[in-house]
Image: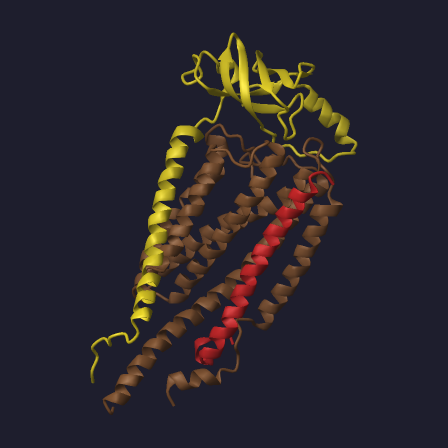
Chain colours: A yellow, B brown, C red
Amino acid sequence: MDLTPRPIAAPESRAQRQRRRWIPVAIVALALAAGGIVVTQFLTSAIDYYCNVDEVGLREGCVGQRRIRVQGNVLENSLQQVDGVTLFALSFNDKTLQVRYQGDPGGVFQECIPVVAHGRIINGIFDSDRIEVKHTNQYVEKNKSRFDEATNETAACSQSPE
Amino acid sequence: MTTFQTAFEAKSKTTGTAASKKLGAATIVAVIFLVLSGLIFSAEDVVQGSTVRIMYVHVPSIWVAYLAFALTAIFSGVYLSNRSRSLIWDRLAGASAEIGVLFVAVSLVTGSLWGRLTWGTFWVWDARLTSTAFLFITYIGYLAVRRLGGTFRQRARRSSVMALLSVLEIPLVHFSVNLWRTLHQKASVADPNAKVSLDGLMLFTLFWGLISFTMLFAWLLVHRQRLMALEDAVQDRGLDRAIQQRRTEAGL
Amino acid sequence: MDHASFIIASYALTFVSIAGYALYIVRRARRLGALTSDDDKPWI
């Protein structure tokens, strides 16, 4: 019995078959490349996404005029909107930093909520061009007896190292 | 009568059984109830408002993905350790990984929409999001490796090894919010200190989401694994047909 | 409901993609089920 492989009749089908064989190889190569990009991002950006307010000027990576990300709570009664500029104080572990942001931060931004501000310190004020709200893992139903208790907890507005 | 001829006399054309049909019906009911509870019955959050409703599909999606990838590793381990090297374990592993990839994708997209509303941005390169993206890419790679060709046993062996290595990413993803500083919040329910921080109906809806998504996963796993068995059988049939053709030509 | 479009989109995306995948499985299983014998279906 002849068991040698048969030549494939139509050249088109051979090309199709070859293409089909290369698709998984291409996907593996793409996955490796994408994985490399993600790992690079992880090493350059993801590890310790931010500096806390009390570390600004002290901790490595949080000093000088370089662009940094700072995390803290928006201090109660510090929020102001002046000519399209949002001004507020960011607080963490009893240290405070004045922040200036051009525009409305969006998200669920409000007082007494932890945020991460991107920017740099200019003349003692943190000039931010991007704000991300870092909401907590506490979920409290609205219109509930616990509402007052919850708002009181949030309104305490202080944040300490975990 | 050849095996190939009997193929056309198949009595059952589907991968369903009475039990899987019951599971499917129960899953549909559970999902409908989840949608009603998530969108209508459950209350808004004090800070996030209605946005919190996305959590009821986002968290169960990533839970199913973790479960799927953990099971992929377990099935792969069973395949490698079992002397019979039964391919059912390999198919279960492959099916589970494929479903896991779908659910990670769902989790990434819903998380991105939730992030836009709460954080103010669709995506950040923090440890949780970055490691989840890496997990997603790893398992796409796993699925591609399964399709690299070779015999079923070669496929099973190489993908089993990859599954056992890839599963190590899951604790990294889950605990990334504790290991590093992230924008993503810490776990509310799966907290290592077991401190539940969700109010009544919110917690119930989230648990209901976990249950209904697990049922969805079970249904998909059963059917996808059976479909893989059919795919392998059809591939075998192709080989059988070629051998049969040559036997006929050789007058055997 | 605030941000209804984002919330509905999240639910729709989730369930449409899962339903689409389930439909793919069922339809492909029907097609391949017709090509294979019952011996290849140990679940019957």
Q: Is residue C43 visible?
A: no
Residue B242 versus residue B66: which sits nearer the camera? B242
Residue B33 versus residue B70: which sits nearer the camera? B33
Q: Is residue B58 visible?
A: yes
Q: Quadrant of the N terminus of chain A?
A: bottom left
Is A153 above or below relative to B85? Answer: above
Which residue lies at the image location 54% right of the left edge and 68% below the top edge?
C26
Which residue lies at the image location 47% right of the left edge and 33% below the top edge?
B125
Residue A95 versus residue A40: which sits nearer the camera? A40
Q: Residue B108: x, y in percent?
A: 53, 44
Residue A107 versus residue C29: which sits nearer the camera? A107
Q: Residue B139: x, y in percent?
A: 42, 50
Is B198 above or below relative to A8? Answer: above
Q: Residue B53: x, y in percent?
A: 67, 42
Which residue lies at the image location 68% right of the left edge and 51% below the top edge?
B34
| A149 left or right, relative to C25 | right
Q: Residue B7: x, y in percent?
A: 44, 82
Is A148 above or below relative to B250? Answer: above
